[in-house]
Amino acid sequence: MKELNELQIDILTEAFNLGMGSAAASLSQIVRSEILLSVPELSFIDKATATKQLAKKTKSDLSGVSEDFNGPFNGKALLLFPADQSLILVRLMLQDTVPLESLTEFEEEALNEIGNIILNAGLSSLADMFGQRIETDLPTYTHGSSEDIINAGTGDEALHNIVLFLQIDFTIKDADICGYVIYLLDIESMKDFTKLIDLYLAKIS
Amino acid sequence: MANNNFNTEIYESVIAQIAHGIVLLDSNKQIQYWNRWIEQKSGITKKEATGKLLMEVYPNANLQRIDQAITDALEKGHSSTLSQSFSNFKLDLYSNAKKSLPIIPQIYVSPLKDNDKLCLLQITDVTAAVTKERMLKSIANEAQQGRQAAENLSQLKSSFVATVSHELRTPLTSIIGSLGLIKGNVAGKLNSTQTKLIDLTHKNSELLLNLISDILDLEKIESGAIEFDFRSISITNLLKQATSGIEGYGEQLNVNFKLQLPDEDLYVYGDYGKLMQVLNNLLSNAAKFSLPGQSVTISAQTRNHYVRIGVEDHGQGIPESFKATIYDKFTQLDSRDNRNTNGTGLGLAIAKLITDKHNGKIDFHSVVGKGTTFYIDIPAASELDVDNSNQQLNNHQFAG
Protein backbone atom coordinates (compact mmCIF):
# COMPACT_ATOMS: atom_id res chain seq x y z
CA MET A 1 0.00 0.00 0.00
CA LYS A 2 1.40 3.34 -0.99
CA GLU A 3 1.59 5.58 2.04
CA LEU A 4 0.57 9.22 1.88
CA ASN A 5 3.22 11.78 2.69
CA GLU A 6 2.89 14.44 5.37
CA LEU A 7 1.76 17.13 2.93
CA GLN A 8 -0.95 14.89 1.48
CA ILE A 9 -2.16 14.04 4.99
CA ASP A 10 -2.16 17.74 5.95
CA ILE A 11 -4.20 18.77 2.95
CA LEU A 12 -6.73 16.01 3.58
CA THR A 13 -7.02 16.90 7.27
CA GLU A 14 -7.65 20.51 6.29
CA ALA A 15 -10.33 19.49 3.80
CA PHE A 16 -12.08 17.29 6.35
CA ASN A 17 -11.92 19.98 9.00
CA LEU A 18 -13.61 22.34 6.53
CA GLY A 19 -16.25 19.70 5.89
CA MET A 20 -16.78 19.17 9.61
CA GLY A 21 -17.18 22.92 10.07
CA SER A 22 -20.02 22.90 7.59
CA ALA A 23 -21.55 19.74 9.14
CA ALA A 24 -21.33 21.34 12.60
CA ALA A 25 -23.16 24.42 11.31
CA SER A 26 -25.97 22.25 9.87
CA LEU A 27 -26.24 20.17 13.04
CA SER A 28 -26.19 23.26 15.28
CA GLN A 29 -29.05 24.69 13.25
CA ILE A 30 -31.07 21.50 13.59
CA VAL A 31 -30.70 21.22 17.35
CA ARG A 32 -30.51 24.98 18.01
CA SER A 33 -27.45 24.55 20.15
CA GLU A 34 -23.77 24.98 19.39
CA ILE A 35 -22.03 21.86 18.16
CA LEU A 36 -18.32 21.77 17.42
CA LEU A 37 -16.66 19.13 15.26
CA SER A 38 -12.99 18.62 14.59
CA VAL A 39 -10.69 16.05 13.03
CA PRO A 40 -7.64 15.67 15.26
CA GLU A 41 -6.35 12.51 13.59
CA LEU A 42 -6.30 11.10 10.07
CA SER A 43 -4.48 8.06 8.72
CA PHE A 44 -4.42 5.68 5.77
CA ILE A 45 -4.23 2.10 6.97
CA ASP A 46 -5.25 -1.36 5.83
CA LYS A 47 -8.58 -2.82 6.87
CA ALA A 48 -7.15 -5.28 9.44
CA THR A 49 -5.21 -2.51 11.20
CA ALA A 50 -8.28 -0.25 11.17
CA THR A 51 -10.39 -3.02 12.72
CA LYS A 52 -7.80 -3.58 15.46
CA GLN A 53 -7.37 0.14 16.12
CA LEU A 54 -11.07 0.69 16.37
CA ALA A 55 -11.53 -2.27 18.72
CA LYS A 56 -8.67 -1.00 20.89
CA LYS A 57 -10.00 2.57 21.01
CA THR A 58 -13.64 1.72 21.67
CA LYS A 59 -13.59 -1.53 23.67
CA SER A 60 -17.30 -2.14 23.05
CA ASP A 61 -19.83 -2.72 20.31
CA LEU A 62 -20.24 0.13 17.88
CA SER A 63 -23.30 1.93 16.57
CA GLY A 64 -23.24 4.12 13.56
CA VAL A 65 -24.22 4.98 10.05
CA SER A 66 -22.99 3.67 6.75
CA GLU A 67 -23.47 4.96 3.20
CA ASP A 68 -22.01 3.99 -0.15
CA PHE A 69 -20.47 6.58 -2.42
CA ASN A 70 -19.54 6.71 -6.09
CA GLY A 71 -17.42 9.14 -8.03
CA PRO A 72 -13.80 9.34 -9.14
CA PHE A 73 -13.26 6.76 -6.40
CA ASN A 74 -15.83 4.37 -4.93
CA GLY A 75 -16.39 2.91 -1.55
CA LYS A 76 -18.30 2.96 1.67
CA ALA A 77 -18.31 5.69 4.32
CA LEU A 78 -18.97 4.91 7.97
CA LEU A 79 -19.47 7.07 11.04
CA LEU A 80 -19.03 4.96 14.15
CA PHE A 81 -19.35 5.49 17.90
CA PRO A 82 -18.98 3.24 20.90
CA ALA A 83 -22.64 2.19 21.48
CA ASP A 84 -22.96 4.09 24.78
CA GLN A 85 -21.55 7.27 23.20
CA SER A 86 -24.07 7.11 20.36
CA LEU A 87 -26.84 6.99 22.97
CA ILE A 88 -25.45 10.07 24.72
CA LEU A 89 -25.00 11.96 21.45
CA VAL A 90 -28.49 11.28 20.11
CA ARG A 91 -30.17 12.01 23.44
CA LEU A 92 -28.24 15.23 23.89
CA MET A 93 -29.30 16.29 20.41
CA LEU A 94 -32.91 15.23 20.92
CA GLN A 95 -32.91 16.66 24.45
CA ASP A 96 -34.24 13.31 25.53
CA THR A 97 -33.89 12.30 29.15
CA VAL A 98 -35.57 8.91 29.13
CA PRO A 99 -32.86 6.44 30.13
CA LEU A 100 -33.67 3.52 27.82
CA GLU A 101 -30.79 1.11 27.35
CA SER A 102 -30.62 1.15 23.59
CA LEU A 103 -31.55 3.45 20.74
CA THR A 104 -35.21 3.38 19.84
CA GLU A 105 -36.26 3.07 16.21
CA PHE A 106 -36.54 6.82 15.78
CA GLU A 107 -33.33 7.52 17.63
CA GLU A 108 -31.69 5.24 15.07
CA GLU A 109 -33.26 7.38 12.34
CA ALA A 110 -31.95 10.49 14.12
CA LEU A 111 -28.45 8.98 14.25
CA ASN A 112 -28.82 8.21 10.53
CA GLU A 113 -29.51 11.87 9.88
CA ILE A 114 -26.54 13.00 11.99
CA GLY A 115 -24.27 10.52 10.20
CA ASN A 116 -25.70 11.47 6.83
CA ILE A 117 -24.89 15.16 7.39
CA ILE A 118 -21.34 14.42 8.59
CA LEU A 119 -20.46 11.85 5.93
CA ASN A 120 -21.94 13.96 3.12
CA ALA A 121 -20.06 17.03 4.37
CA GLY A 122 -16.76 15.12 4.41
CA LEU A 123 -17.30 13.78 0.90
CA SER A 124 -18.47 17.19 -0.26
CA SER A 125 -15.17 18.74 0.88
CA LEU A 126 -13.24 16.11 -1.05
CA ALA A 127 -15.45 16.63 -4.11
CA ASP A 128 -14.92 20.41 -3.93
CA MET A 129 -11.17 20.00 -3.48
CA PHE A 130 -10.89 17.65 -6.44
CA GLY A 131 -13.48 19.49 -8.54
CA GLN A 132 -15.38 16.23 -8.99
CA ARG A 133 -18.87 14.93 -8.20
CA ILE A 134 -19.17 12.25 -5.49
CA GLU A 135 -22.65 10.75 -5.25
CA THR A 136 -23.91 9.20 -2.03
CA ASP A 137 -26.61 6.63 -1.31
CA LEU A 138 -29.09 6.84 1.55
CA PRO A 139 -27.58 6.09 4.96
CA THR A 140 -28.33 2.94 6.92
CA TYR A 141 -28.01 2.30 10.64
CA THR A 142 -25.39 -0.21 11.66
CA HIS A 143 -24.50 -1.90 14.96
CA GLY A 144 -21.99 -4.60 15.88
CA SER A 145 -18.33 -5.30 16.55
CA SER A 146 -15.72 -3.29 14.65
CA GLU A 147 -14.82 -6.40 12.68
CA ASP A 148 -18.41 -7.18 11.66
CA ILE A 149 -19.12 -3.60 10.63
CA ILE A 150 -15.94 -3.02 8.65
CA ASN A 151 -16.21 -6.37 6.88
CA ALA A 152 -19.96 -6.09 6.17
CA GLY A 153 -20.81 -5.66 2.53
CA THR A 154 -17.29 -4.78 1.41
CA GLY A 155 -17.21 -7.86 -0.79
CA ASP A 156 -13.86 -9.17 -1.90
CA GLU A 157 -11.26 -8.71 0.84
CA ALA A 158 -8.59 -7.55 -1.56
CA LEU A 159 -10.84 -5.06 -3.31
CA HIS A 160 -11.66 -3.06 -0.23
CA ASN A 161 -8.48 -3.23 1.71
CA ILE A 162 -7.67 0.40 2.25
CA VAL A 163 -9.17 2.56 4.90
CA LEU A 164 -9.06 6.30 5.40
CA PHE A 165 -9.43 6.52 9.15
CA LEU A 166 -10.51 9.74 10.87
CA GLN A 167 -11.16 10.49 14.47
CA ILE A 168 -13.95 13.03 14.92
CA ASP A 169 -14.39 14.94 18.17
CA PHE A 170 -17.84 16.30 18.98
CA THR A 171 -18.50 18.95 21.58
CA ILE A 172 -22.15 19.39 22.40
CA LYS A 173 -23.62 20.98 25.51
CA ASP A 174 -20.37 20.60 27.49
CA ALA A 175 -20.15 16.91 26.61
CA ASP A 176 -17.23 15.57 24.58
CA ILE A 177 -17.99 12.61 22.37
CA CYS A 178 -15.48 10.81 20.22
CA GLY A 179 -16.52 9.19 16.95
CA TYR A 180 -14.71 7.69 14.00
CA VAL A 181 -15.22 8.18 10.29
CA ILE A 182 -13.99 5.46 8.02
CA TYR A 183 -13.84 5.50 4.24
CA LEU A 184 -13.34 2.05 2.80
CA LEU A 185 -11.73 2.34 -0.63
CA ASP A 186 -10.83 -0.28 -3.21
CA ILE A 187 -7.30 -0.51 -4.60
CA GLU A 188 -8.15 1.23 -7.86
CA SER A 189 -9.93 3.98 -5.98
CA MET A 190 -6.91 4.43 -3.77
CA LYS A 191 -4.72 5.05 -6.80
CA ASP A 192 -7.22 7.55 -8.20
CA PHE A 193 -7.51 9.16 -4.80
CA THR A 194 -3.74 9.71 -4.48
CA LYS A 195 -3.60 11.01 -8.04
CA LEU A 196 -6.32 13.54 -7.29
CA ILE A 197 -4.53 14.78 -4.17
CA ASP A 198 -1.33 15.27 -6.16
CA LEU A 199 -3.20 17.10 -8.91
CA TYR A 200 -4.73 19.39 -6.31
CA LEU A 201 -1.34 20.01 -4.68
CA ALA A 202 0.20 20.80 -8.07
CA LYS A 203 -2.64 23.22 -8.74
CA ILE A 204 -2.22 25.17 -5.53
CA SER A 205 1.60 25.17 -5.34
CA MET B 1 -35.86 -12.45 -16.61
CA ALA B 2 -38.03 -9.38 -17.06
CA ASN B 3 -41.37 -9.96 -18.69
CA ASN B 4 -41.69 -7.90 -21.84
CA ASN B 5 -45.43 -7.65 -21.32
CA PHE B 6 -44.72 -5.28 -18.46
CA ASN B 7 -44.90 -1.94 -20.15
CA THR B 8 -44.30 1.52 -18.77
CA GLU B 9 -48.00 1.89 -17.88
CA ILE B 10 -47.81 -1.08 -15.56
CA TYR B 11 -44.66 0.23 -13.84
CA GLU B 12 -46.33 3.60 -13.48
CA SER B 13 -49.36 1.97 -11.98
CA VAL B 14 -47.16 0.14 -9.45
CA ILE B 15 -45.45 3.37 -8.39
CA ALA B 16 -48.77 5.19 -8.23
CA GLN B 17 -50.18 2.55 -5.89
CA ILE B 18 -47.18 2.26 -3.61
CA ALA B 19 -47.92 3.03 0.08
CA HIS B 20 -45.38 5.87 0.25
CA GLY B 21 -45.23 9.30 -1.26
CA ILE B 22 -43.15 9.47 -4.43
CA VAL B 23 -42.29 12.86 -5.93
CA LEU B 24 -39.88 13.41 -8.79
CA LEU B 25 -38.35 16.86 -9.31
CA ASP B 26 -36.31 18.10 -12.25
CA SER B 27 -33.19 20.23 -12.00
CA ASN B 28 -35.36 23.36 -11.57
CA LYS B 29 -37.16 21.71 -8.63
CA GLN B 30 -40.30 21.46 -10.78
CA ILE B 31 -42.59 18.55 -10.00
CA GLN B 32 -42.44 15.90 -12.73
CA TYR B 33 -44.19 13.11 -10.90
CA TRP B 34 -46.68 13.05 -8.00
CA ASN B 35 -48.02 9.62 -7.05
CA ARG B 36 -51.45 8.62 -5.75
CA TRP B 37 -50.34 8.38 -2.07
CA ILE B 38 -49.26 12.03 -2.01
CA GLU B 39 -52.39 13.07 -3.92
CA GLN B 40 -54.45 11.48 -1.17
CA LYS B 41 -52.42 12.84 1.73
CA SER B 42 -52.03 16.38 0.41
CA GLY B 43 -55.37 16.83 -1.31
CA ILE B 44 -53.41 18.17 -4.32
CA THR B 45 -53.98 16.22 -7.52
CA LYS B 46 -51.25 15.02 -9.84
CA LYS B 47 -52.62 17.37 -12.47
CA GLU B 48 -52.49 20.36 -10.13
CA ALA B 49 -48.96 19.55 -8.93
CA THR B 50 -47.20 18.52 -12.13
CA GLY B 51 -45.12 21.29 -13.70
CA LYS B 52 -45.24 23.45 -10.59
CA LEU B 53 -42.22 24.23 -8.42
CA LEU B 54 -42.25 22.26 -5.19
CA MET B 55 -41.93 25.60 -3.39
CA GLU B 56 -45.11 26.83 -5.10
CA VAL B 57 -47.02 23.84 -3.76
CA TYR B 58 -45.35 24.09 -0.33
CA PRO B 59 -44.14 27.69 0.09
CA ASN B 60 -42.69 26.95 3.55
CA ALA B 61 -40.41 24.24 2.22
CA ASN B 62 -37.81 26.68 0.91
CA LEU B 63 -36.96 27.68 4.46
CA GLN B 64 -36.48 24.13 5.54
CA ARG B 65 -33.79 21.50 5.34
CA ILE B 66 -35.72 19.71 2.63
CA ASP B 67 -34.83 22.49 0.18
CA GLN B 68 -31.10 22.18 1.00
CA ALA B 69 -31.34 18.39 0.66
CA ILE B 70 -32.93 18.75 -2.80
CA THR B 71 -30.21 21.21 -3.85
CA ASP B 72 -27.53 18.79 -2.57
CA ALA B 73 -29.12 15.91 -4.49
CA LEU B 74 -29.30 17.87 -7.75
CA GLU B 75 -25.99 19.69 -7.53
CA LYS B 76 -23.75 17.27 -5.62
CA GLY B 77 -25.48 13.93 -6.07
CA HIS B 78 -25.93 13.51 -2.32
CA SER B 79 -28.70 11.50 -0.70
CA SER B 80 -30.21 12.75 2.54
CA THR B 81 -32.47 11.38 5.18
CA LEU B 82 -34.70 13.84 7.04
CA SER B 83 -35.75 12.17 10.24
CA GLN B 84 -38.94 13.21 11.94
CA SER B 85 -36.94 13.59 15.17
CA PHE B 86 -34.89 16.56 13.97
CA SER B 87 -37.00 18.10 11.29
CA ASN B 88 -39.55 20.69 12.13
CA PHE B 89 -40.81 20.88 8.58
CA LYS B 90 -44.43 20.34 7.82
CA LEU B 91 -45.38 19.26 4.34
CA ASP B 92 -49.04 19.65 5.27
CA LEU B 93 -49.87 16.00 4.74
CA TYR B 94 -52.98 14.56 6.35
CA SER B 95 -54.38 11.14 7.03
CA ASN B 96 -56.93 11.86 4.31
CA ALA B 97 -57.54 14.49 1.69
CA LYS B 98 -60.17 16.20 3.86
CA LYS B 99 -57.31 17.33 6.07
CA SER B 100 -58.46 15.56 9.20
CA LEU B 101 -55.24 14.69 11.07
CA PRO B 102 -51.74 15.78 10.10
CA ILE B 103 -49.31 12.92 9.59
CA ILE B 104 -45.68 12.76 10.73
CA PRO B 105 -43.49 12.18 7.69
CA GLN B 106 -40.03 10.73 7.30
CA ILE B 107 -38.45 11.96 4.07
CA TYR B 108 -35.65 10.57 1.93
CA VAL B 109 -34.12 12.74 -0.77
CA SER B 110 -31.78 11.30 -3.38
CA PRO B 111 -30.58 11.91 -6.92
CA LEU B 112 -32.20 9.53 -9.36
CA LYS B 113 -29.65 6.86 -10.28
CA ASP B 114 -28.23 7.27 -13.80
CA ASN B 115 -30.02 10.56 -14.18
CA ASP B 116 -28.44 13.35 -12.22
CA LYS B 117 -30.98 15.87 -13.54
CA LEU B 118 -33.74 14.36 -11.41
CA CYS B 119 -34.30 14.26 -7.70
CA LEU B 120 -36.45 11.64 -5.99
CA LEU B 121 -38.40 12.35 -2.80
CA GLN B 122 -39.75 9.36 -0.85
CA ILE B 123 -42.14 10.15 1.96
CA THR B 124 -43.19 7.66 4.61
CA ASP B 125 -45.98 8.04 7.15
CA VAL B 126 -44.44 7.23 10.55
CA THR B 127 -47.28 8.70 12.66
CA ALA B 128 -48.37 5.43 14.27
CA ALA B 129 -44.84 4.35 15.13
CA VAL B 130 -43.90 7.79 16.49
CA THR B 131 -47.06 7.98 18.60
CA LYS B 132 -46.36 4.54 20.02
CA GLU B 133 -42.76 5.43 20.81
CA ARG B 134 -43.77 8.72 22.44
CA MET B 135 -46.26 6.87 24.61
CA LEU B 136 -43.62 4.32 25.65
CA LYS B 137 -41.19 7.10 26.45
CA SER B 138 -43.80 8.95 28.43
CA ILE B 139 -44.51 5.80 30.47
CA ALA B 140 -40.77 5.21 31.01
CA ASN B 141 -40.40 8.86 31.99
CA GLU B 142 -43.22 8.73 34.52
CA ALA B 143 -41.81 5.53 35.99
CA GLN B 144 -38.38 7.15 36.26
CA GLN B 145 -39.82 10.25 37.95
CA GLY B 146 -41.77 8.04 40.34
CA ARG B 147 -38.66 6.07 41.26
CA GLN B 148 -36.69 9.26 41.74
CA ALA B 149 -39.37 10.80 43.96
CA ALA B 150 -39.56 7.64 46.08
CA GLU B 151 -35.79 7.56 46.38
CA ASN B 152 -35.64 11.23 47.42
CA LEU B 153 -38.39 10.72 49.96
CA SER B 154 -36.68 7.67 51.41
CA GLN B 155 -33.37 9.53 51.70
CA LEU B 156 -35.11 12.49 53.31
CA LYS B 157 -36.84 10.19 55.77
CA SER B 158 -33.61 8.38 56.66
CA SER B 159 -31.69 11.57 57.22
CA PHE B 160 -34.59 13.05 59.24
CA VAL B 161 -34.83 9.95 61.41
CA ALA B 162 -31.07 9.82 61.97
CA THR B 163 -30.82 13.50 62.87
CA VAL B 164 -33.82 13.58 65.16
CA SER B 165 -32.84 10.33 66.88
CA HIS B 166 -29.31 11.53 67.46
CA GLU B 167 -30.50 14.88 68.80
CA LEU B 168 -32.91 13.12 71.18
CA ARG B 169 -30.44 10.57 72.45
CA THR B 170 -27.88 13.02 73.86
CA PRO B 171 -30.24 14.93 76.23
CA LEU B 172 -32.07 11.72 77.11
CA THR B 173 -28.87 10.05 78.28
CA SER B 174 -28.27 13.00 80.56
CA ILE B 175 -31.90 12.85 81.87
CA ILE B 176 -31.51 9.13 82.67
CA GLY B 177 -28.24 9.81 84.45
CA SER B 178 -29.85 12.51 86.61
CA LEU B 179 -32.88 10.31 87.35
CA GLY B 180 -30.48 7.53 88.44
CA LEU B 181 -28.82 9.91 90.86
CA ILE B 182 -32.19 11.07 92.25
CA LYS B 183 -33.26 7.43 92.60
CA GLY B 184 -30.06 6.77 94.52
CA ASN B 185 -31.04 9.52 96.98
CA VAL B 186 -28.03 11.61 95.98
CA ALA B 187 -30.24 14.72 95.93
CA GLY B 188 -31.88 13.91 99.26
CA LYS B 189 -33.94 11.01 100.55
CA LEU B 190 -37.15 10.35 98.60
CA ASN B 191 -40.46 9.44 100.17
CA SER B 192 -42.39 6.46 98.82
CA THR B 193 -44.57 8.49 96.42
CA GLN B 194 -41.55 10.30 95.03
CA THR B 195 -39.72 6.95 94.63
CA LYS B 196 -42.68 5.48 92.70
CA LEU B 197 -42.86 8.49 90.38
CA ILE B 198 -39.11 8.59 89.79
CA ASP B 199 -39.06 4.82 89.10
CA LEU B 200 -41.80 5.25 86.51
CA THR B 201 -40.02 8.19 84.88
CA HIS B 202 -36.69 6.34 84.88
CA LYS B 203 -38.24 3.21 83.37
CA ASN B 204 -40.01 5.13 80.60
CA SER B 205 -36.91 7.19 79.83
CA GLU B 206 -34.95 3.97 79.38
CA LEU B 207 -37.67 2.62 77.13
CA LEU B 208 -37.43 5.78 75.05
CA LEU B 209 -33.64 5.48 74.86
CA ASN B 210 -33.95 1.85 73.71
CA LEU B 211 -36.39 2.92 71.03
CA ILE B 212 -34.11 5.67 69.77
CA SER B 213 -31.10 3.33 69.74
CA ASP B 214 -33.09 0.73 67.80
CA ILE B 215 -34.29 3.31 65.26
CA LEU B 216 -30.73 4.53 64.77
CA ASP B 217 -29.43 0.96 64.39
CA LEU B 218 -32.12 0.07 61.90
CA GLU B 219 -31.50 3.18 59.84
CA LYS B 220 -27.74 2.64 59.80
CA ILE B 221 -28.02 -1.00 58.73
CA GLU B 222 -30.63 -0.21 56.07
CA SER B 223 -28.59 2.64 54.61
CA GLY B 224 -25.38 0.57 54.70
CA ALA B 225 -23.73 3.10 57.06
CA ILE B 226 -22.61 0.28 59.34
CA GLU B 227 -19.82 -1.93 58.10
CA PHE B 228 -19.90 -5.56 59.13
CA ASP B 229 -16.68 -7.06 60.42
CA PHE B 230 -16.91 -10.62 59.13
CA ARG B 231 -14.63 -13.24 60.63
CA SER B 232 -14.72 -16.77 61.96
CA ILE B 233 -16.62 -16.91 65.27
CA SER B 234 -16.68 -19.70 67.85
CA ILE B 235 -20.30 -20.62 68.60
CA THR B 236 -19.34 -21.72 72.13
CA ASN B 237 -17.92 -18.28 72.93
CA LEU B 238 -20.81 -16.47 71.29
CA LEU B 239 -23.58 -18.41 73.03
CA LYS B 240 -21.85 -18.43 76.44
CA GLN B 241 -21.43 -14.67 76.34
CA ALA B 242 -24.97 -14.10 75.09
CA THR B 243 -26.41 -16.24 77.87
CA SER B 244 -24.37 -14.72 80.65
CA GLY B 245 -25.33 -11.25 79.41
CA ILE B 246 -29.05 -11.97 79.70
CA GLU B 247 -29.02 -13.88 82.98
CA GLY B 248 -29.66 -10.75 85.07
CA TYR B 249 -32.77 -9.97 83.03
CA GLY B 250 -33.86 -13.61 83.38
CA GLU B 251 -33.53 -13.42 87.15
CA GLN B 252 -35.79 -10.35 87.23
CA LEU B 253 -38.47 -12.36 85.39
CA ASN B 254 -37.68 -15.63 87.16
CA VAL B 255 -36.78 -17.34 83.88
CA ASN B 256 -33.63 -19.42 83.59
CA PHE B 257 -31.50 -20.15 80.51
CA LYS B 258 -30.21 -23.60 79.50
CA LEU B 259 -27.32 -23.77 77.08
CA GLN B 260 -27.02 -26.92 74.94
CA LEU B 261 -23.64 -26.80 73.23
CA PRO B 262 -22.45 -29.34 70.62
CA ASP B 263 -19.63 -31.70 71.67
CA GLU B 264 -17.27 -30.11 69.20
CA ASP B 265 -17.18 -26.35 68.81
CA LEU B 266 -18.77 -24.93 65.64
CA TYR B 267 -17.67 -21.84 63.76
CA VAL B 268 -19.70 -19.35 61.77
CA TYR B 269 -18.56 -16.56 59.45
CA GLY B 270 -20.08 -13.39 60.82
CA ASP B 271 -19.88 -10.16 62.76
CA TYR B 272 -19.56 -10.99 66.47
CA GLY B 273 -21.16 -7.79 67.80
CA LYS B 274 -24.10 -7.92 65.39
CA LEU B 275 -24.81 -11.60 66.04
CA MET B 276 -24.69 -10.85 69.77
CA GLN B 277 -27.33 -8.14 69.15
CA VAL B 278 -29.57 -10.69 67.39
CA LEU B 279 -29.16 -13.23 70.21
CA ASN B 280 -29.82 -10.61 72.89
CA ASN B 281 -33.04 -9.77 71.16
CA LEU B 282 -34.17 -13.38 70.73
CA LEU B 283 -33.22 -14.29 74.32
CA SER B 284 -34.91 -11.26 75.91
CA ASN B 285 -38.06 -11.90 73.80
CA ALA B 286 -38.05 -15.55 74.92
CA ALA B 287 -37.71 -14.49 78.57
CA LYS B 288 -40.40 -11.84 78.19
CA PHE B 289 -42.94 -14.30 76.82
CA SER B 290 -42.14 -17.09 79.32
CA LEU B 291 -43.97 -17.57 82.60
CA PRO B 292 -42.11 -17.33 85.90
CA GLY B 293 -40.31 -20.57 86.62
CA GLN B 294 -40.04 -21.58 82.97
CA SER B 295 -36.76 -22.01 81.13
CA VAL B 296 -35.40 -20.95 77.73
CA THR B 297 -33.11 -23.35 75.84
CA ILE B 298 -30.33 -22.17 73.53
CA SER B 299 -28.86 -24.73 71.15
CA ALA B 300 -26.59 -24.95 68.11
CA GLN B 301 -26.17 -27.56 65.41
CA THR B 302 -24.76 -27.78 61.88
CA ARG B 303 -27.18 -27.79 59.00
CA ASN B 304 -25.61 -28.25 55.54
CA HIS B 305 -23.26 -25.29 55.16
CA TYR B 306 -24.92 -23.35 57.96
CA VAL B 307 -24.97 -23.37 61.73
CA ARG B 308 -28.44 -23.19 63.20
CA ILE B 309 -28.80 -21.41 66.53
CA GLY B 310 -32.15 -22.05 68.22
CA VAL B 311 -33.83 -20.19 71.10
CA GLU B 312 -36.78 -22.14 72.51
CA ASP B 313 -39.29 -20.93 75.06
CA HIS B 314 -42.40 -22.54 76.54
CA GLY B 315 -44.42 -19.36 76.71
CA GLN B 316 -47.68 -18.20 75.20
CA GLY B 317 -46.70 -18.73 71.52
CA ILE B 318 -47.34 -16.46 68.56
CA PRO B 319 -50.93 -16.14 67.29
CA GLU B 320 -51.48 -16.92 63.57
CA SER B 321 -52.65 -13.37 62.89
CA PHE B 322 -49.32 -11.98 64.04
CA LYS B 323 -47.00 -14.36 62.17
CA ALA B 324 -47.05 -12.62 58.79
CA THR B 325 -46.06 -9.21 60.17
CA ILE B 326 -43.69 -10.31 62.90
CA TYR B 327 -40.59 -8.80 61.21
CA ASP B 328 -42.32 -5.52 60.35
CA LYS B 329 -41.15 -2.41 62.14
CA PHE B 330 -43.05 -1.33 65.24
CA THR B 331 -45.02 -4.55 65.57
CA GLN B 332 -45.15 -5.88 69.07
CA LEU B 333 -47.08 -8.61 70.82
CA ASP B 334 -48.18 -7.97 74.38
CA SER B 335 -46.74 -10.46 76.81
CA ARG B 336 -49.28 -12.58 78.62
CA ASP B 337 -49.29 -10.52 81.78
CA ASN B 338 -47.97 -7.24 80.39
CA ARG B 339 -44.93 -7.48 82.57
CA ASN B 340 -41.88 -5.30 82.37
CA THR B 341 -41.26 -5.73 78.62
CA ASN B 342 -39.39 -2.57 77.56
CA GLY B 343 -39.90 -3.56 73.92
CA THR B 344 -39.66 -1.17 71.00
CA GLY B 345 -41.19 -3.31 68.28
CA LEU B 346 -38.00 -3.02 66.27
CA GLY B 347 -35.94 -5.89 67.66
CA LEU B 348 -37.01 -8.56 65.18
CA ALA B 349 -36.82 -6.12 62.26
CA ILE B 350 -33.19 -5.45 63.22
CA ALA B 351 -32.51 -9.16 63.78
CA LYS B 352 -33.82 -9.95 60.31
CA LEU B 353 -31.74 -7.20 58.70
CA ILE B 354 -28.60 -8.47 60.44
CA THR B 355 -29.16 -12.14 59.48
CA ASP B 356 -29.90 -11.05 55.89
CA LYS B 357 -26.59 -9.17 55.80
CA HIS B 358 -24.92 -12.44 56.84
CA ASN B 359 -26.60 -14.21 53.90
CA GLY B 360 -28.39 -16.12 56.60
CA LYS B 361 -31.98 -16.72 57.55
CA ILE B 362 -34.21 -16.12 60.54
CA ASP B 363 -37.40 -18.12 61.09
CA PHE B 364 -39.55 -19.58 63.83
CA HIS B 365 -42.14 -22.17 64.63
CA SER B 366 -44.67 -21.54 67.31
CA VAL B 367 -47.70 -23.19 68.86
CA VAL B 368 -50.08 -21.00 70.84
CA GLY B 369 -50.03 -22.03 74.50
CA LYS B 370 -46.96 -24.25 74.05
CA GLY B 371 -44.15 -21.98 73.08
CA THR B 372 -41.94 -20.66 70.29
CA THR B 373 -38.57 -21.58 68.82
CA PHE B 374 -36.76 -18.87 66.91
CA TYR B 375 -33.74 -19.94 64.93
CA ILE B 376 -31.13 -18.26 62.83
CA ASP B 377 -29.04 -20.00 60.17
CA ILE B 378 -25.63 -18.39 59.71
CA PRO B 379 -23.08 -19.58 57.09
CA ALA B 380 -20.51 -21.93 58.65
CA ALA B 381 -16.93 -20.68 58.49
CA SER B 382 -14.63 -22.55 56.13
CA GLU B 383 -11.35 -23.97 57.43
CA LEU B 384 -9.59 -21.11 55.69
CA ASP B 385 -11.76 -18.54 57.53
CA VAL B 386 -10.97 -20.24 60.82
CA ASP B 387 -7.22 -20.28 60.06
CA ASN B 388 -7.21 -16.63 59.03
CA SER B 389 -9.10 -15.54 62.11
CA ASN B 390 -6.75 -17.52 64.37
CA GLN B 391 -3.82 -15.94 62.58
CA GLN B 392 -5.27 -12.45 63.11
CA LEU B 393 -5.89 -13.26 66.76
CA ASN B 394 -2.30 -14.52 67.21
CA ASN B 395 -0.88 -11.44 65.49
CA HIS B 396 -3.00 -9.26 67.70
CA GLN B 397 -1.85 -11.03 70.85
CA PHE B 398 1.76 -10.94 69.69
CA ALA B 399 1.55 -7.23 68.91
CA GLY B 400 -0.15 -6.58 72.23
Image: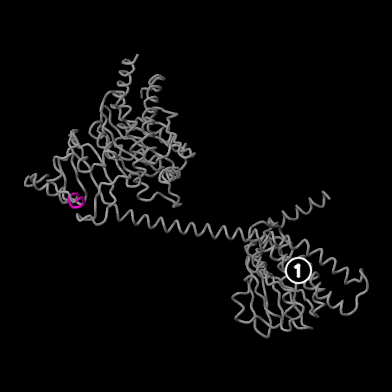
Badge 1 amino acid = Leu
Quarter location, residue B325? bottom right
**Residue at image x 87%, y 76%?**
B195
Task: Give the farthest residue toward the right.
Answer: B188
**In the image, residue B40 lies in the stretch drawn in magenta:** yes
- Residue A52 in view here: no
- Dividing the picture into quadrants, the one containing residue B265 is bottom right
Q: Is residue A69 above or below residue A61?
A: above
The residue at the far left in this view is B5
Rate crowding at label 1 as few (under 14), some (14 to 19) or many (20 or more) other CA atoms within 10 Å: many
Left or right of A103 on screen, residue B184:
right
User: In what quadrant of the picture does the N terminus of chain B appear?
Assistant: top left
Q: Does residue B370 appear left or right of residue A136 in this picture?
A: right
Residue B71 coordinates in the image, percent (x, y)? 25, 34
**What secondary structure is found at the residue carrying circle 1?**
helix
Considering depth in this image, is B352 or A205 the residue closer to the camera? A205
> What residue sits 31% from the left and 15% below the top?
A203
Q: A97 or B283, which lies in front?
A: A97
Q: From what the image shows, is residue B46 above or below residue A161?
A: below
Q: Chain of mark 1?
A: B
Where residue B255 appears, as percent x and y from the top left, is 79, 79
Q: Position of residue B305 (x, y in %)?
A: 63, 65
Q: Is residue A150 magenta?
A: no
Q: Which stretch appears magenta?
A: B38-42
Name the residue tied to disc 1.
B239
Residue B226 can be seen, yes or no: yes
